[in-house]
Image (cartoon, rainbow, N blue to C red):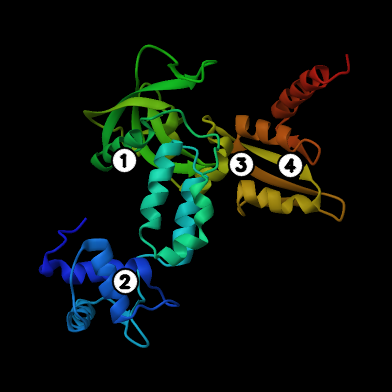
């Protein structure tokens, strides 16, 4: 990492030692630092050089405590922030297990050894339902670059086959106008406009391969009816549960009052209360129709779709099929 044996690098080597072996609760003596310089970098040093280089680091802006030993106090990320970053990687389904382990190792290198001892459990990375797409991170970078440059993209869109491998949904590539990358349920999605139409479409980035940035400028959002007033991301996400594409509808849901937490989790706080009693509530939400269909099936025993009638009829068919599937034979 550093040119060991080079005295000009001594302050950086000492800084690295302070990063790894000290924190607010653990200090290093001058002798500790001298031993670690020899052990880790093969660097000879005396007490005066240690103190002088630490003073130099303090002058450079590093917050180092010199009371009862030396501690690096201020870091790029505190422990709670590092835990959030690690948890985000652990439960992301959009990256492979190998990539997740690599990212966690990099995050842990930002902390002291004492923090790493507290999170030693992350070395046994849970084998979650992760993507089989090794191009996922490349796709994410390419799409981000295209959005910044306001350029269209082409890509192959895939589904997982019975062999657990990705297979193209069709021979011709998709050509879209990319507008926003969002994270939902552990996956990254692209909010875009399919170039041939005027509607908004969502694509799972871990299902995209061979992403290519085109020279063509994207279609302005103002030319996409659903986005003509710009992208209100919180509203858009609340209306598109499960990231289904298609138009949103106004719907009424009847549920017990203790379902309020679930309703807020899924629809935010912008829905309206139509009726309220001790026994039940009726709320009005605006949501993608297909997404609301699957939501109602998920919460079937606890919630009832009152409106629209077309969705009630669809759910009646779904429930009849489910009842037949589960009928005792």
Residue contact at pointers 1 and 4, CB within 8 angstroms: no
Q: Quadrant of residue 287?
A: top right
Residues packed near mark 2 inside 10 Å, few (<14), some (14 to 19) or many (20 plus): many
Q: Nearer the viewer, residue 51 or 260?
A: 51
Q: Earlier in the sequence, mark 1 or mark 4?
A: 1
Q: Is residue 44 left or right of residue 125?
A: left
Q: CA distance from mark 2 to mark 4?
A: 57 Å
Q: CA distance from mark 3 to mark 1?
A: 29 Å
Secondary structure of the residue carrying numbered label 4: strand
Q: Which mark is residue 286?
A: 3
Q: Quadrant of residue 327?
A: top right
Q: Is residue 217 left or right of residue 269?
A: left
Q: Earlier in the sequence, mark 2 or mark 1?
A: 2
Q: Report the residue marked by disc 2.
A: 18
Residue contact at pointers 3 and 1, CB within 8 angstroms: no
Quadrant (top left, top right, bottom left, bottom right) of the C terminus? top right
Secondary structure of the residue carrying numbered label 2: helix
Secondary structure of the residue carrying numbered label 3: strand
Quadrant (top left, top right, bottom left, bottom right) of the N terminus? bottom left
Q: Earlier in the sequence, mark 2 or mark 4?
A: 2
Residue contact at pointers 2 and 4, CB within 8 angstroms: no
- Where residue 192 appears, as percent x and y from the top left, is 40, 33
Q: Report the residue marked by disc 4.
A: 253
Q: Which mark is residue 144?
A: 1
């Amino acid at each position: 990492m550093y040119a060991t044996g080079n005295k000009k690098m001594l302050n950086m080597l000492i800084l690295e030692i302070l990063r790894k072996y000290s924190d607010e609760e653990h200090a290093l003596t001058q002798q500790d630092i001298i031993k670690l310089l020899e052990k880790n970098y093969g660097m000879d040093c005396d007490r005066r050089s240690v103190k002088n280089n630490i003073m130099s680091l303090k002058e450079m802006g590093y917050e180092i405590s010199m009371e009862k030993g030396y501690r690096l106090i201020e870091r790029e990320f505190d422990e709670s922030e590092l835990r959030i970053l690690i948890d985000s990687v652990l439960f992301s389904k959009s990256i492979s297990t190998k990539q997740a382990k690599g990212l966690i190792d990099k995050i842990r290198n930002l902390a002291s050894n004492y923090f790493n001892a507290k999170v030693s459990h992350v070395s046994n990375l849970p084998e979650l339902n992760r993507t089989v797409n090794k191009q996922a991170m490349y796709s994410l970078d390419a799409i981000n670059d295209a959005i910044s440059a306001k350029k269209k993209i082409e890509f192959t869109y895939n589904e997982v086959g019975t062999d657990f491998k990705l297979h193209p949904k069709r021979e011709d590539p998709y050509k879209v106008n990319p507008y926003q990358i969002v994270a939902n349920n552990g996956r990254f999605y692209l909010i875009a406009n399919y170039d041939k139409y005027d509607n908004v479409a969502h694509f799972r980035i871990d299902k995209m391969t061979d992403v290519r940035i085109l020279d063509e400028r994207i279609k302005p959002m103002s030319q996409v009816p659903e986005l003509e007033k710009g992208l209100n991301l919180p509203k858009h996400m609340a209306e598109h549960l499960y990231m289904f594409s298609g138009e949103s509808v106004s719907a009424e849901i009847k549920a017990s009052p203790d379902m309020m937490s679930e309703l807020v989790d899924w629809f935010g706080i912008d829905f309206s209360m139509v009726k309220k009693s001790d026994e039940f509530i009726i709320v009005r939400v605006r949501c993608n129709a297909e997404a609301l269909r699957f939501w109602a099936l998920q919460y079937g025993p606890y919630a009832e779709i009152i409106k629209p009638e077309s969705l009630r009829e669809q759910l009646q068919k779904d429930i009849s099929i489910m009842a037949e599937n589960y009928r005792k034979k």
